[in-house]
Amino acid sequence: MEIKIENILILWDEKVTDIFVSLINTLSLSFSETEIRNSMAKLSENENFGRLFAYGFGAHHLWVAQRMITDPEKVMENRLLIVEF
């Protein structure tokens, strides 16, 4: 598995950095698709994670995007990172 950071992190909330570091650490310690899915489900239980980030899965990858400051229902145009498994 490989974590690719594809965009800059916008620090519009004081919790962004801590949650992003937690995300990277969690993904770095995951060794299978199942572990990634379980880890993301656990992270998404944190209401701040869901308020600041959106994520989804493709056939062989996980993507994470940062939510927009002006409208948290929308995500930024470019994803923040991708993990291929």
Image (cartoon, rainbow, N blue to C red):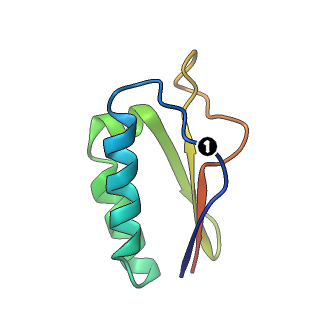
Single out the residue that lies furthest toward the top.
Answer: 70
Residue at left offset 33%, top offset 65% = 26
The image quarter in which residue 29 lies: bottom left
Residue at left offset 73%, top offset 37% = 77
Q: Is residue 7 left or right of residue 29?
A: right
The image quarter in which residue 19 lies: top left
Q: Say what amino acid the circle numbered 1 marks.
A: Ile
Locate residue 81, reporting x and y percent.
Answer: 59, 57
Single out the residue that lies furthest toward the right.
Answer: 77
Locate residue 15, reporting x and y percent.
Answer: 32, 33
Q: Quadrant of the C terminus?
A: bottom right
Q: Is residue 22 left or right of residue 3?
A: left
Within-10-Å neighbours for mark 1: few <14, some 14–19, many 20+: few
Observer-nearest residue: 74 or 8? 8
The mark total stands at 1
Q: Is residue 28 left or right of residue 72?
A: left
Q: Relative to 82, is 67 above or below? A: above
Q: Relative to 3, is 6 above or below? A: above
Residue at left offset 61%, top offset 34% = 75
Q: Relative to 72, is 8 above or below? A: below
Q: Relative to 46, is 4 above or below? A: below
Locate residue 37, reporting x and y percent.
Answer: 41, 68
Q: Is residue 68 left or right of residue 22?
A: right
Locate residue 34, reporting x and y percent.
Answer: 40, 79
Q: Which residue is mark 1?
A: 8
User: Helix, strand, or loop for circle 1?
Assistant: loop
The image quarter in which residue 57 lies: bottom right
Residue at left offset 29%, top offset 35% = 47
